[in-house]
Amino acid sequence: MSSLLEARDLVKHFPLKGIRAWLSAMGGGARPAVRAVDGISLRLAPGETLGLVGESGCGKSTVARCLLRLIEPSAGRILFDRTDLSALPDEPLRRLRRDLQMVFQDPNASLNPRLTVRRTVDEPLRLHTTLTTAERQDAVREVLDRVGLGPELLHRYPHELSGGQRQRVNIARAIATRPRFVILDEPTSALDVSLRAKIILLLDDLRTRLGMTYLFISHDLATVKYLAHRVAVMYLGTIVEEAPTRELFSKPLHPYTRALLSAIPIPDPDAKRERLILAGEVPSPIDIPTGCRLRTRCPLAQPVCAEPVGLREVTPNHFVACHLV
Amino acid sequence: MTPLLEIRDLAVHFAADEGRVEAVDGISLTVRRGEILGLVGESGSGKSVTALAVLRLIRPPGRIVRGSIRFDGRELLDLSEEAMRHVRGSQIAMIFQSPRTALNPVLPVGRQIARLFELHRGCSGHEAWQRTLEILRLVGIPEPERRASQYAHQLSGGMCQRVMIAMAVATEPRLLLADEPTTGLDVSIAAQILDLLRELGRRTGASMVLITHDLGVVAGVCDRVAVMHAGQLVECSDVHGLFKHPAHPYTRALVRSIPRVDREVTMEPIPGAVPSVLEPPPGCRYADRCPWVIDRCREVKPELLPLEHDHEVACHAVEPSNVVPARS
C-alpha cells in the first residue's frame, strides 16, 4: 500500500523547567519531561480517513502539531508523499503548506476577530498560490459555496456569525488551497447536536469530492465511527489499538478501548451492556507507569503487565498492544 | 401526594436593545419525588433559564413574567428573598456546567464546602471540617484530607465536578438541578460522574433535574424526559416511551440526528437552524423546520396534551394514530 503520509516512531517530549527539574538533574536522575508523544507510528493511504481517538492529555493534538511541524518533534520521521517532512528546511516546508492544512477545535478562538470572512479565506490563497486578485475573489466565493455559506457573509466578522457558520469558515479556510491532507482536530466538539451532524456530513462529502485525506482527531467515538475508515486509539502518548473502524467497534480487544466504548452513553434506555470500568484517572505523562501504561487502572491487570508491550498484529490489520490478548 | 416541583405556565423574558427575548415561553412541568427528570434541548432552548428560574436566580434584564413554581406545595414566586435564600441553601441545590469556573479560585475547596455547613447547618468550625471530609469521601475523592486544602486549579476537571457535587449535596437538598454536569469531561470520567449522581439520588431519595443535550445520558440515567425547543416544551414522557415512540417531529429529528456507536444507522441532520426567540411570531416555534407543518401551527401555540400513559406532546399534527414506533 502506498501511503500519503507516514509517521515513524514519532516522539515529542517537553522537558520540565524550574526547581524540581533542576533538583532531579542534580540528584543524578534523568531530566524529567512531559512525554506527550512517546513513539507512535501512523500510515494514511490517499483518500482515507484515519480516526485518532483518546481522552484529554493522551497526546493526540501533539501528534497533529508534530505531523504538520507546527512544533518540532523530538525524534522520529514524517514522510509526506515521499518527502521527509522532519528534515525539510523552512522554505520548501512553507511551499508544501498548501497541501497540509488543519481545522482547529474551537471555531471562536481560531478565527482572527479583525478579519472578515473574505480575508480569512483569502489569506491562504494569497500566501500559497499565484492566483490574481480577481481569481482569488472567485476562488473564495467558490469555496464558501462548497461549505454551504452564501456570498452575503463575505464581509462579516467572526462575531457576526453563528457557531456553525464559524466552523464552516474554518473549514473553508483549510480547504481553500485544495490541500491533499487535512487534520481535523475535534472539529465538532464545540457544536450543538443538530449542527454536529451537518458538519460531519459536510466534511465527508468534501473529502470524497476533493479527494482529500483526513486525520480526524476526536474523543467522540460515535463521530469517529461515522467518518473514519480506520481508527487508532491513543493512551498516554502511545497507540494501544488500531483497526478498521467496523472491526474496532464490533471486536475491540484492548481493555482501554473496551472501557472507552462501554462508557459511551447510548440513546436506548433498554440497552443491556457490559461495563468495563477503569479505576481512577489518567496518570501524569511525567510519571508514566513502566510496562503497559494502563496497568495501574486496568481491571484485568496481571503481573506480566509490568513487562513492556508493543503493538502486534493479532488478526489482519488489527493491531493491539496488550499482553492478555 | 403532590409532586415535589410543579411548574405551571412559566415564562421568562429578557429585555434586549432589539426587543424582547422570550427565552422560556409558558412551560409546564412536574418533578416527582425521587425521580430523575431529563431536560433536553439544544443551546438556547431555555433549559438553563428554566433551572435558574426555579432558584429565582433570573437577574435583570431577565424577568419571570408569569407562571407559578410550587415546591413541595409552596409557591416559590411568592416567597420573600430571605425565605428564598433558605430554600436555595438547603432545599434546592444546583450543579453548574463548568465546575472550575463555578468554584472560588482563591479559597481551598474544602473551605468552600465547610462554609455551607457553618451557614446552613450551624456547625462549629471543627465539626464543619469533619463533615466536609466525610462528604468528599462520599463523592469518591481519594485522600480527602489533602484534596480539601487544595485550590480548584490543582484539581482535574473530574475532581472539580466531584467537589461541585459534594457542595450541592452537602446540605441534603430535596431537589438537585444539574446543568450539563458531564459536558467537557472525558467519556470515562463522565460515566463515573453519572454513576455517582444516580447513586446519590438513590441513597438520599432526592429528586433531580438533569439538563443535558446528550440523549445518551438521558437514556442511561433518567426516569422521565422533557424536550425543549426554542423556549417551548414540546414533549414530556417516561424515558422508555420517549425513545420507543418519539411523537413530536422535533424529538424524532433529534433522535435521528445523532451518530451512534451501538448500531449501524444513517445520521440525518435536523433541517434548518434553531429559530431566534427575539419577539418570535405566535404558534409553534418548530414550524419553520417541521415537515408536518399545517397552517394552524403558525397561528396557535399547541398545548401539551396526553398521548398515552405518562406521555404528553405539544403538536397540532400529532394524533395517537400517527405515532409510529422509532426505527430500531
Image: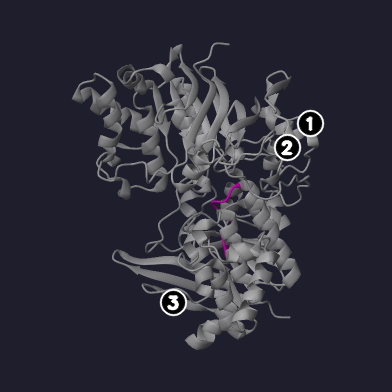
To which residue does mark 3 refer? B65
**Left or right, residue A276 beside residue B110:** right
- Looking at the image, which is closer to me, B100 or A153? B100
Residue A167 on the magenta span: no
Q: Are marks 3 and 2 on the same chain?
A: no
* Residue A62 x/y as whole percent: 48, 34
* Residue A286 x/y as whole percent: 56, 41
To which residue does mark 2 refer? A255
Helix, strand or loop at disc 1? Answer: loop
| Amino acid found under the numbered disc labelled 1 | Leu
* Residue A172 x/y as whole percent: 37, 32
**Distance from Cα at disc 3 to Cα at disc 2:** 53 Å
User: Which residue is at a point 42% across and 26% down the rendered structure image?
Assistant: A68
Seen from this angle, which residue lies furthest front?
Answer: A27
| Amino acid found under the numbered disc labelled 3 | Val
Q: Residues within 10 Å of mark 2 (few under 14, many from 20)?
A: many
Which is in the foreground here, disc 3 or disc 2? 2
To which residue does mark 1 refer? A324
Q: Are marks 3 and 2 in contact (CB under 8 Å)?
A: no
In the image, residue B294 sits, relative to residue A53, either above or below, namely below
Residue B182 on the magenta span: yes
- Chain ID at mark 2: A
| Amino acid found under the numbered disc labelled 2 | Pro
**Res B69 seen here:** no
- Looking at the image, which is closer to me, A267 or B253? A267
**Res B17 seen here:** yes
**Distance from Cα at disc 3 to Cα at disc 1:** 63 Å
User: Which residue is at a point 49% across and 64% down the rendered structure image?
Assistant: B102
